[in-house]
Image (tube, rainbow, N blue to C red):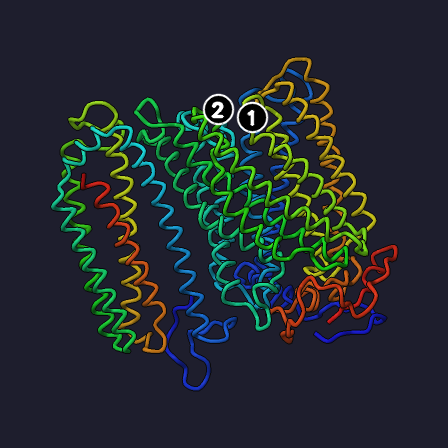
Amino acid sequence: MSPSPASSPPVYAVRNYLNTPATGLRSWLTTRDHKRIGVMFLVAVTVAFAVGGFFAMLIRVEHLTPGPTIMDAMTYNRVFTLHGVVMIFLFMIPAIPSGFGNFLLPIMVGAKDVAFPRLNLLSFYLYLLGAGIALWGMIHGGADTGWTFYTPYSTTTSSKVVPILLGAFVLGFSSILTGLNFIVTTHTLRAPGITWTKLPLFVWSIYATSVIQILATPVLGMTLLLVAIEHAFGWGIFDPARGGDPVLFQHFFWFYSHPAVYIMILPAMAVISEVVCAFSRKNIFGYKAVAYSSLGIAFVGFFTWGHHLFTSGQSPYDAGIFGALSMFVGIFTAIKVFNWVATMYKGSIDFKTPFIYFLGFLFFLFFGGMTGIALATVSLDIHWQDTYFVVAHFHFIMVGSTMMAFLAALHYWWPKMTGRMYSERWALVAAVFIILGFVFTFLPQFLLGNEGMPRRYFSYPERYWALNVASTAGASVLAIGFTIVLGYILVALRYGAVAGPNPWGSRGYEWLTPSPPPLENFDVLPAFERGPHQYHDLPAAPPTPAPGPAGEAAGASHG
Amino acid sequence: MADHAAAAPGGPHAALAHHFESLEKQGQAQRLGMWLFLATEILLFTALFAAYGVYRYLYTGAFAEASRGLATWMGGVNTFVLVTSSLTVALGLDAARQGRTRRTAGLFFLSIGLGLVFMTLKAVEYRHHFLLGELPGPSYRGHIPGSGGSLFFSLYFLITGLHAFHVLAGMTVLGVIGVKAWRGAYSAEYHVPVELAGLYWHLVDLIWIFVFPLIYLQ
């Protein structure tokens, strides 16, 4: 890319991945281009998010009154199960890695594509297949087990648990293929000049995620298959009536599903490491600490699953060890948080939407993380086990943080993906709605849980009513916020101001190429002489903030 | 993964995908990809092995008795057959390295034959279990009282069944690559798919090497 003077108007790359080699639906559905596959994943996970959000709203509306409000107890069980299954397997696990990761990782390592483009497309179709099977199960009755499918209930329930299990099984393979592709791409397709310590932190964190996806997902696949077999044929593996051990299921399930939490949060941290540098105009503080702590989280994450079994008959000795190991995750996370905060110190902070979401992320991560440390303490956990306190905790840490990062990524890379700017003003309004809405939804749930309201219960005593109403009110604000986002990004798709290659004045490698990027990512491969977060030698002053999208677009590229 | 035909004279190798700079780099990527895939396969089985370990601990006596009832000699012969097939696959790869791809094809077909022997013996064993009523879960009609016997056979059929499925998949892979090798798709310079097929077959063999002592030996 040729450097352009700061005064020239931003250019929309005419020949780009969106129209090369063709624009038809067929050319999209048969594409091998990682950018198109990433965009298709983003569209698919957004639909899934809308479905999961719809179920969430049904739950919240149901809880407006202590007794039945809009549905019966059985429907309620199905709704919260589907909410969990859709949000976890169809949205949070694939959202950032398969969506943004697919789009960005090859560009960030200076590659033309991922190592195995056909497997990449297969991964997308496996996602659709898994989603389709699960959807079939939802329409034909749905499951009422909760997303954790705990045995022996899941093997004896008469609801359609088998298709949902098989759907999640297939989705696992989609996840494995994406992770495999990213690891091989990072190892073998880095452009000359991009050494391991010059990799963008986004890549480091996605790499750590991929390790978990590859090592943990097969165990979940096998476990879900065993539950499906148990449900269909009664072979007894997890059925106490036939000598099986239902707690073994819990061990297997959490061996995957606890690391899966880091499949959700590590990509969020990946996004945040990029955003904090770009909008503080500071080099990352402690590059290696941030990079290696991702691997640390991935590693320790495999030894913490027992903290889900504190009340499942685990020995106090095991529980203590698992509790202590769980706290190591807090140490690695804190390393990251301190480094992000230190990055902001004396930075030239630009309060654009992605940065607002970064602040939201920090708050949610901190709040969710600290309650996580509390929950890792066995004695406290026994009080909070299976209450709304746990629900609020994991919504803060994995939903709140991941959602913040997803939105930060969406706004930060939107100009790169579409070549156009969104409306900054509307985006700020939506960010305020979403962050406040989220806090008002889940903060009351901490209080409810601490007072003893159990999770997954259909009805509750009168005294929990006020806090439940507050939570539902918060969820409504949250829903309004998301609707606004959907509105202005669709408008921006067509009417947004032209962004140019680098509207943020970011130093990330992905901003060295035109927006939207050309078919093989770079017209001329840059030399990658400087680091991806290097701001101390900026050639010119950062673009002056100006009201309105046109003003932001004036920022020149610093090639 | 690219598995295309031979070199086009002059230009880049026909098997070279557009996003790799050289066949060598592409080969490295494909090998790494295969190893990662094998890691997922191992973990798939690990879950079953772990379950087997837990129940063997919980039902020591029943598992020992059920295991004694298996035809160890058949398992032993099958182990020998599979290890031999791994040898023939390795010799096939060696032939490909020397550019003798017809020999590769022949050795791969021999390996498929050994795979068939393995599957036949397995089928004989399965038939024997069916006749004795040694079936998983509620279908168990064997002589071991309590839950131990039925659990053993649930796990036995899950583990050996999943392994047999992998043997079939491996035979298919060897067949496809063998036919391509016969038609001259590979050469001394380019034979990564031969290597990958070999890796997969070795994994299938290696898993059996763990299955055999776990299930057949005390």
Up-down relation of residue A221 to residue B188 (above or below): above
Up-down relation of residue B116 to residue B2 (above or below): above
Residue under the point 71% across and 54% down: A275
**Subunit under mark 2:** A
Q: In x, y percent, where is residue A46?
A: 63, 46
Farthest residue toward the bottom?
A: B10
Task: Name the residue tied to disc 1.
Answer: A381
Q: Specify the quadrant of the image occupied by residue A61.
A: top right
Q: Amino acid at mark 2?
A: Thr
Residue under the point 63% across and 32% down: A371
Q: Specify the quadrant of the image occupied by residue B65.
A: top left
Depth order, front residue of A371/A142:
A371
Tag 2's secondary structure?
Answer: loop
Q: Amino acid at mark 1?
A: Asp
Q: Is residue A457 left or right of residue A551?
A: left
Q: Tell me whether the residue at label 1 lies in contact with that at label 2, contact meaning CB atoms closer than 8 angstroms.
A: yes
Badge 1: few (under 14), some or many (20 or more) residues near its Cα, within 10 Å? many
Residue B86 visible:
yes
Tag 1's secondary structure?
Answer: helix
Q: Specify the quadrant of the image occupied by residue B37.
A: bottom left
Task: For the C terminus of chain A, give its image quadrant.
Answer: bottom right
Badge 2: few (under 14), some or many (20 or more) residues near its Cα, within 10 Å? some
Residue under the point 79% across and 55% down: A347
Task: Name the residue tied to disc 2.
Answer: A311
Residue under the point 29% across and 40% down: B158
Up-down relation of residue A321 to residue A215 (above or below): above
Sequence-wise first label, 1 or 2: 2
Q: In x, y percent, where is residue A136?
A: 49, 38
Q: In x, y percent, where is residue A316?
A: 46, 26
